[in-house]
Image (tube, rainbow, N blue to C red):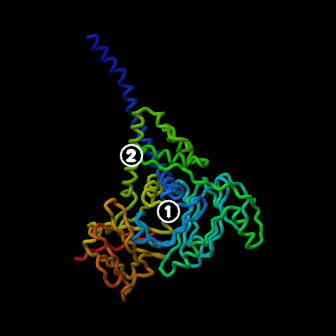
């Protein structure tokens, strides 16, 4: 009898401890989920930077603070990437501003559509230089890190980066294959220079000395460790490593206070050993919950009408994480809007076994101030979308009444034709510098009709 009472007493004393442990694990899991959503864009930027500047298997690997120019648009041979387009020549550079500012000078662009955006580790735009904002004669920029306190010459516009690392991604529109060679020349005339490089060039060109020092700084070296997909805590590891390269802003510092129970410290390794085994399990589960929520966020941030999926306006952590996961470095809506179709007007999945038509009435063509393109993709068994063919307002031929009929089928046909694959397919309509009707949600793309 005494043994039974002792057992009951022990259980009664242990019950609150067990309850607190369970409550603590649930709280830690929720906290890890929110932290993983917050840091996911940083992890994606870290992966992209590592692949571009460190990965020895990447044939296009390049040095920091140097442009890597893509010399041709995407085509059916562009297999490594998903959802690529053949609208642009791309230029990419990863900037390290820890020791020296960088100078960005674009050549006269005339009537060309161009866009150069500088993205911080959270994928926020530190600056956008585009035809829409700056016309055909963009002003030279000096891009400076958070510790820079020098004086910029009056002819330069200052871009202040919140951190020492930025991704510079440039786009120049290609509306005809005949334009490739002159566009490549314009592309390579975009200059990305250190103070010393710019000073030497100006001495040669104008005999004018700059007010900056002429001793070249030590060139930064890309030597970051590779991402570790096999580590369940790699999301925290890579994000903390990248954020540790710069001082935190007040907003980011407040966010890390929010996650203080996880002991996340920028610039330091995530110490999983500081937690008990049940706590580590809870944190790992929270990260898995975050990735599942990010992958399923399309339902929250898009709306499908007549088979076409439209983006919805949003500005929160989950939306930023979802964008980084699906379309990293996508242009802002004022520059471009993207609509995707995976099904026809009746909601049936698009497939190459069928024939389709897409008809734009004369008064309902894609509302672009500059350019629109329609790209067709083959969907592989792994879910990747591989570019196959495209049409645009530069090469599409309207009917006599001004309408536009596009045929989607495997066999070649006269008129506007997009070649379809044997299996599942996807369409994406890109509208550059969209009209207010599209920005405000009043324009709808016609549904895709299956031909019986």
Q: Which mark is residue 447?
A: none
Q: Is residue 22 left or right of residue 223?
A: left
Q: Which mark is residue 288?
A: 2
The image shows residue 371 at horizontal and vertical percentages of 47, 76
Examine the rendered structure and indicate whether residue 384 appears above or below residue 16.
below
Q: Is residue 235 left or right of residue 352?
A: right
Q: Is residue 34 left or right of residue 212?
A: left
The image shows residue 208 at horizontal and vertical percentages of 77, 69
Element assignment for label 1: loop
Q: Nearer the viewer, mark 1 or mark 2?
A: 1
10 Å crowding of disc 2: few (<14), some (14-19), many (20+): some
Q: Mark 1 or mark 2, which has the lower sequence index?
A: 1
Task: Identify which residue is drawn at 63% across, 68% down.
Answer: 191
Q: Is residue 297 visible?
A: yes
- Residue pointed to by mark 1: 59
From mark 1 to mark 2, how far is it between C-alphas? 32 Å
Examine the rendered structure and indicate whether residue 81 appears above or below residue 114.
above
Classify residue 215 by image quadrant.
Answer: bottom right
Classify residue 218 by image quadrant.
Answer: bottom right
Q: Nearer the viewer, residue 450 or 145?
A: 145
Task: Identify which residue is drawn at 53% across, 43% down.
Answer: 256
The image shows residue 172 at horizontal and vertical percentages of 53, 72
Q: Quadrant of the C terminus?
A: bottom left
Q: Are marks 1 and 2 in contact (CB under 8 Å)?
A: no
Task: Identify which residue is drawn at 52% across, 56% down.
Answer: 49
């Amino acid at each position: 009898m005494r043994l039974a009472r002792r057992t009951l007493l022990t259980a009664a004393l242990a019950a609150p401890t067990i309850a607190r442990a369970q409550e603590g694990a649930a709280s830690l899991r929720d906290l890890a989920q929110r932290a993983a959503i917050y840091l996911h864009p940083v992890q994606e930027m870290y992966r992209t930077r590592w692949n571009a500047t460190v990965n020895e298997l990447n044939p296009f690997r390049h040095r920091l603070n140097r442009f890597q120019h893509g010399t041709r648009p995407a085509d059916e041979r562009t297999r490594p990437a998903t959802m690529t387009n053949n609208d642009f020549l791309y230029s990419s550079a990863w900037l390290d501003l820890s020791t020296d500012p960088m100078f960005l000078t674009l050549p006269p662009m005339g009537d060309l559509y161009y866009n150069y955006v500088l993205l911080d580790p959270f994928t926020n735009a530190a600056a956008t230089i585009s035809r829409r904002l700056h016309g055909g004669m963009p002003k030279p920029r000096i891009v400076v890190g958070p510790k820079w306190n020098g004086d910029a010459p009056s002819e330069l516009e200052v871009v202040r980066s919140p951190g020492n690392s930025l991704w510079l991604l440039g786009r120049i529109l290609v509306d005809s294959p005949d334009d490739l060679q002159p566009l490549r020349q314009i592309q390579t005339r975009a200059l990305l220079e250190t103070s010393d490089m710019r000073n030497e060039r100006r001495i040669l060109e104008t005999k004018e000395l700059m007010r900056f020092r002429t001793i070249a700084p030590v060139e930064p070296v890309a030597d970051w460790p590779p991402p570790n997909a096999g580590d369940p805590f790699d999301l925290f590891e890579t994000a903390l490593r990248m954020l540790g390269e710069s001082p935190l802003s007040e907003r980011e510092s407040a966010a890390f206070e929010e996650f203080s129970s996880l002991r996340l410290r920028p610039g330091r390794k995530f110490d999983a050993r500081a937690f008990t085994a049940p706590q580590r399990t809870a944190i790992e589960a929270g990260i898995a919950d975050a990735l599942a929520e990010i992958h399923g966020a399309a339902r929250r941030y898009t709306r499908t009408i007549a088979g076409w999926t439209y983006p919805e306006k949003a500005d929160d952590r989950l939306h930023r994480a979802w964008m980084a996961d699906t379309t990293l470095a996508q242009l802002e809506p004022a520059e471009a809007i993207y609509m995707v179709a995976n099904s026809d007007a009746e909601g049936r999945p698009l497939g190459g076994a069928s024939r389709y038509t897409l008809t734009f009435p004369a008064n309902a063509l894609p509302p672009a101030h500059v350019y629109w393109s329609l790209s067709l993709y083959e969907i592989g068994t792994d879910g990747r979308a591989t570019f196959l063919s495209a049409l645009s307002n530069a090469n599409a031929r309207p009917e006599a009444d001004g309408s536009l009929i596009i045929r989607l089928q495997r066999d070649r046909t006269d008129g506007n034709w997009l070649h379809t694959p044997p299996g599942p397919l996807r369409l994406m309509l890109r509208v550059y510098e969209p009209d207010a009707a599209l920005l405000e949600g009043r324009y709808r793309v016609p549904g895709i009709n299956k031909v019986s």
